[in-house]
Image (tube, grey):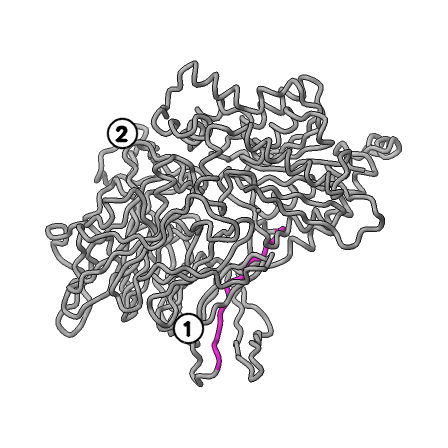
């Protein structure tokens, strides 16, 4: 074998994959540190149970950890016994080791805590597997073929798995059954019911169907099912129109001798299904429908016969444009839910939430005319230190204190996440996490009146600096910009940010106007002003940090993804001498290109045109509209860019298709700019697969080190 070429490259100081020896050394040292941060596990969910001896509380934590070699996330269960000591302190007595849950999609304990549902979704057309675990063994196991339904939804948005009160039935959301496809052979089309074997035929594709965009590509319509855990019989819930996509199902309070009802969230697709991931501006409502099982003689559960004749789906919230996360009070007297009506009505993809209540009928029969009571309204403009409004990306399944009327929520509160209590009859709201804490608090689960929580200014910015500086000189500064734009960066632990801080950078994390957590007025000030107001907010934050002596103006770099990438590429164009380096992840660079290729074209109109964007949105933009979209895009400032820029792009991104970043990178390279592009062929918008996430931040660290010496 001729190795002379390899030897000559080493002699010249260049490595085979195009980097010099010093850069390769930087990759090696940074990757070792990054692996330490990557290996840190995350608590995803938690549950509490009363032990048989009645002493203390037993807790179970669902934990995930990246597995770089397998390019997946490991899932574990870790148990702990929580005891209140005599001195008032609480101690956690942890199990010696966690237990890995291989192949598990989701886990849901029963209301009493005596059973655990474990779902293993199908792989390679194998059946979906349901397991019912008891205290010491797997009690039941059911295999559900694709002809009944596909994978169970477990993503936290359409996800809905709910045990009934006597723990005999489980309602859940799964992909509808696989549709039949046309069959062809060498003789042409084969009619249905043909007895011919498949060896001489093949399946066609059939009609293309819309999906819900980013992260839902290839997934079938979410539909509602109920399984009898004694018999394993599965029934689809009938009477629900095909236009509704189902999610977040819960059992309504049951009354002996009366029908059992299910309450769920329904999204009506109408025509096109616009992208729903991260988008709360999709209209939705709460519906109620009868469960498909009934109690027969001998208290045996049987599927209903002729169910389609008497099933009616009742819209419980037709007077409000958004309703989701339904939860019944412990006594079953009322139903509470969140609403993103501000987002739906304005078109902003995320905005300030509101909380509402419906008094549940005493006869248990859903009432479509029930009054919707406002519990926590939208906060338009919050005074300093006061409640800025509700911003809840998720809520607990069991969220009630022992009084049965007070619910516990985690909500963004300016640049932190706070735990709050809401009395749903009086509307009284109290911040129960420390008001003077700079940490973010996330409630994991409740035990009676105790919270198990994890802890991690109108524009605010968070400065992260090292305590181990070796001189009085300022560390190089990375300006960190969140996406959305209606999102927020809070003061919680981030492995990637901790890594960048550990290799010698200060971080300026900017929550520009338009971020969540500061009231609806501040949020709605940004649509129609993207590329100007948000850019000026970031520049103001940078200048303030420099004026305070926290940053060296000659060592400032910038990093952002999605709308944060939009901001980053705007900044290096509008302030070309401000930044020594930049890095972007799936950036929005050209709105005129994006509007015709994204799964959320309405976002382009709303953020560009403001309040009128929702009403003028069209799938066929005019020349004038395309001109406006281009003028407000970073690519319109490309001729001024001087900053070396790293592009990290997911080839399967439906939100900001890869063509957006590639066009900008090619154009920048064409004019002589210094550009590095890495495309991850199997990643979507978030670039979250463990190997891709690792390679992303390793390259960011090396790229910034190269220019921030």
* Residue farthest along the top direction in this orientation: 623
> Residue 592's x, y, as percent?
48, 21
Residue 529's place in the image compared with 680, above or below, is above
SS at mark 1 in the image? loop
Relative horizontal placement of residue 190, taking residue 534 as reference (left or right): left
SS at mark 2 in the image? strand
* Residue farthest along the right direction in this orientation: 11
Sequence-first tag of 2 and 1: 2
Residue 364's place in the image compared with 216, above or below, is below
Write the residue at 70% across / 46% down.
Answer: 500
Between 292 and 250, the one lying in front of the other is 250
In this picture, which residue range is highlighted in magenta?
A: 56-69
Q: Is residue 66 on the magenta stretch?
A: yes
| Residue 148 seen in the current view | no
Write the residue at 22% across / 66% down.
Answer: 254
Determine which residue is flagged by label 2.
Answer: 189
Between 3 and 180, the one lying in front of the other is 180
Q: Which mark is residue 448?
A: 1
> Residue 165's x, y, as percent?
28, 69
> Residue 641's x, y, as percent?
67, 23
Relative horizontal placement of residue 470, taking residue 405 as reference (left or right): right
């Amino acid at each position: 074998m001729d190795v002379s070429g390899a030897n000559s490259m080493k002699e010249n100081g260049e490595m085979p994959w195009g980097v010099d020896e010093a850069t390769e050394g930087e990759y090696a040292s940074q990757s070792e540190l990054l692996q330490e941060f990557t290996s840190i596990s995350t608590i995803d969910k938690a549950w509490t149970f009363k032990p048989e001896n009645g002493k203390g509380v037993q807790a179970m934590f669902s934990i995930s950890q990246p597995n770089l070699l397998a390019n997946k996330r490991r899932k574990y269960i870790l148990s702990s016994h929580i005891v209140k000591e005599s001195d008032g302190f609480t101690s956690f007595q942890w199990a010696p080791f966690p237990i890995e849950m291989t192949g598990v999609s989701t886990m849901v304990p029963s209301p009493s805590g005596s059973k655990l549902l474990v779902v293993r979704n199908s792989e390679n057309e194998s059946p979906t597997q349901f397991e019912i675990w008891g205290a010491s063994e797997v009690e039941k196991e059911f295999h559900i073929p694709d002809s009944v339904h596909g994978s169970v939804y477990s993503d936290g948005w359409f996800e809905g798995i709910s045990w009934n009160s006597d723990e005999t039935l489980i309602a859940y959301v799964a992909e509808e059954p696989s549709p039949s496809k046309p069959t062809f052979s060498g003789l042409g089309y084969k009619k249905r019911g043909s007895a011919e074997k498949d060896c001489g035929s093949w399946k066609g594709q059939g009609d293309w169907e819309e999906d819900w965009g980013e992260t839902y590509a290839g997934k079938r319509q979410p539909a509602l099912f109920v399984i009898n855990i004694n018999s394993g019989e599965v029934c689809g819930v009938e009477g629900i129109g095909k236009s509704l996509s189902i999610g977040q199902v819960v059992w309504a309070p049951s009354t002996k001798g009366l029908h059992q009802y299910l309450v769920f969230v329904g999204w009506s697709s109408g025509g096109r299904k616009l992208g729903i991931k991260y988008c709360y501006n999709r209209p939705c409502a709460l519906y109620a429908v009868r469960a498909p099982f009934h109690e027969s003689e001998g208290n045996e559960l049987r599927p209903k016969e002729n169910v389609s004749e008497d099933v009616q789906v009742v819209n419980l919230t037709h007077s409000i444009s958004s309703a989701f996360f339904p939860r019944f009070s412990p006594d079953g007297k009322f139903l509470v839910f969140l609403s993103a009506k501000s987002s739906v009505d304005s078109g902003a993809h995320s905005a300030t939430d509101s909380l509402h209540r419906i008094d549940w009928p005493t006869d248990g029969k859903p009432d479509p005319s029930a009054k919707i009571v406002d519990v926590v309204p939208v906060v338009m403009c919050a005074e300093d230190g006061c409640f800025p409004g509700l911003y809840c990306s998720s809520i607990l399944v069991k969220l009630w204190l022992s009084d049965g009327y007070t619910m516990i929520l985690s909500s963004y509160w300016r640049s932190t996440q706070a735990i709050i209590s809401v009395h749903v009859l009086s509307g009284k709201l109290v911040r129960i996490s420390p008001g003077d804490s700079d940490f973010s608090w996330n409630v994991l689960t409740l035990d009676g009146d105790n919270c198990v929580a994890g802890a991690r200014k109108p524009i605010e910015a968070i400065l992260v600096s090292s305590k181990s500086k070796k001189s009085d000189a300022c560390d190089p500064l990375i300006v960190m910009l969140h996406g959305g734009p209606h999102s927020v960066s809070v003061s919680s632990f981030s492995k990637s940010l901790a890594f960048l801080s550990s290799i010698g950078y200060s971080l300026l994390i900017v929550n520009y106007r338009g971020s969540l957590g500061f009231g609806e007025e501040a949020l709605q000030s940004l649509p129609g002003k993207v590329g100007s107001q948000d850019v000026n907010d970031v520049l103001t934050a940078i200048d303030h940090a420099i004026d305070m002596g926290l940053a060296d103006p000659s060592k400032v770099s910038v990093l952002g993804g999605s709308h944060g990438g939009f901001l980053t590429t705007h900044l290096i164009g509008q302030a070309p001498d401000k930044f020594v380096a930049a890095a972007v992840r799936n950036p929005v660079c050209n709105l005129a290109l994006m509007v015709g290729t994204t799964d959320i074209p309405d976002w382009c109109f709303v953020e560009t045109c403001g309040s009128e964007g929702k009403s003028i949105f069209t799938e066929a933009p005019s020349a004038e509209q395309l001109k406006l979209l281009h003028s407000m895009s970073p690519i319109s400032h490309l001729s001024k860019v001087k900053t070396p820029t790293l592009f990290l792009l997911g080839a399967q991104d439906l939100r900001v298709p890869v063509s957006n970043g590639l066009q900008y990178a090619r154009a920048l390279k064409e004019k002589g700019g210094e550009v590095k592009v890495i495309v991850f062929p199997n990643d979507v918008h978030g670039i979250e697969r463990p190997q891709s996430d690792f390679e992303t931040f390793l390259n960011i660290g090396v790229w910034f080190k190269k220019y921030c010496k």
